[in-house]
Image (cartoon, rainbow, N blue to C red):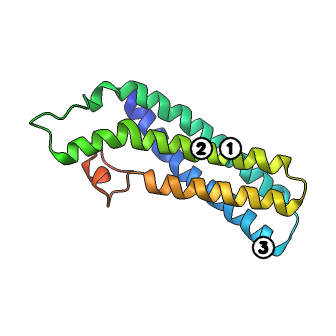
Amino acid sequence: MAEASLLSLFHSILRWLILLSVSVAGFAALIGYLRKAPIIVWERSVAIIAMVLCHVQLVLGLALYALRFKYYGELTPSGRQSFLAQSVVRFWKFEHIGMMILAIALVTMGRMLSKRARTEPGKQLRIAIFYLLGLIIMLMMIPWPFTGVGQAQAIGWF
């Protein structure tokens, strides 16, 4: 289980880099679109870095999912499990992983569709829409300490 703890630490640290890079890329693209400004090299670089970090996070998350699959137990409710425990299992087994895959897919689609756009504002609009939608989903599905899932984590919160 030590491998899972180390992966969990990297997964948690990388989360902050992803939130920062996706936010910067999405809002920079939105501001550029609203100002009708051309895409600057650093904006393009941040969008690429954000997408790559998301993909690395996905690989780490899938590895964590595989290592901890047995830890989350059966889905059938037992007499000893509280409702919170059942919702925590459901969150980790289905909701978190499914919605994070969707968020990463949106970021990837935003980058790919922006490459195909013919105009600079079109490129920026696609990055802004897809990156910010992905960011919203990520923020909703992170187990923050003020949520029931975040409070139920026995390993602590980073």
Q: What crowding class fits label 3: few (fewer than 14 Cα within 10 Å), some (14-19), or many (20 or more)?
A: few
Q: Is residue 122 above or below residue 37?
A: above
Name the amino acid, label 2.
Ile
Name the amino acid, label 3.
Leu
Horizontally, residue 78 falls left or right of residue 20, namely left
Question: Are discs 3 and 1 less than 8 Å apart at CB?
Answer: no
Q: Is residue 30 above or below residue 81?
A: below
Q: Residue at x 49, y 45 (%)?
A: 99
Q: Residue at x 51, y 52 (%)?
A: 138
Cα distance between the residues tagged 3 and 1: 22 Å
Horizontally, residue 12 falls left or right of residue 129, namely left
Q: Secondary structure at mark 1?
A: helix
Horizontally, residue 149 falls left or right of residue 136, namely left
Residue topped by disc 3: 34
Question: Are discs 2 and 1 less than 8 Å apart at CB?
Answer: yes
Q: How many numbered marks have been drawn onto this rendered protein structure?
A: 3
Residue topped by disc 2: 104
Q: How far across and down, in percent of the image, does residue 66 sit?
A: 42, 25
Q: What crowding class fits label 1: few (fewer than 14 Cα within 10 Å), some (14-19), or many (20 or more)?
A: many
Q: Nearer the viewer, residue 39 or 158?
A: 39
Name the amino acid, label 1.
Thr
Q: What crowding class fits label 2: few (fewer than 14 Cα within 10 Å), some (14-19), or many (20 or more)?
A: many
| Residue found at the far left of this picture | 79
Question: Disc 2 or 3, which lies upstream in sequence?
Answer: 3
Residue topped by disc 1: 108
Q: Is residue 36 above or below residue 155?
A: below
Question: Disc 3 or 1, which lies upstream in sequence?
Answer: 3
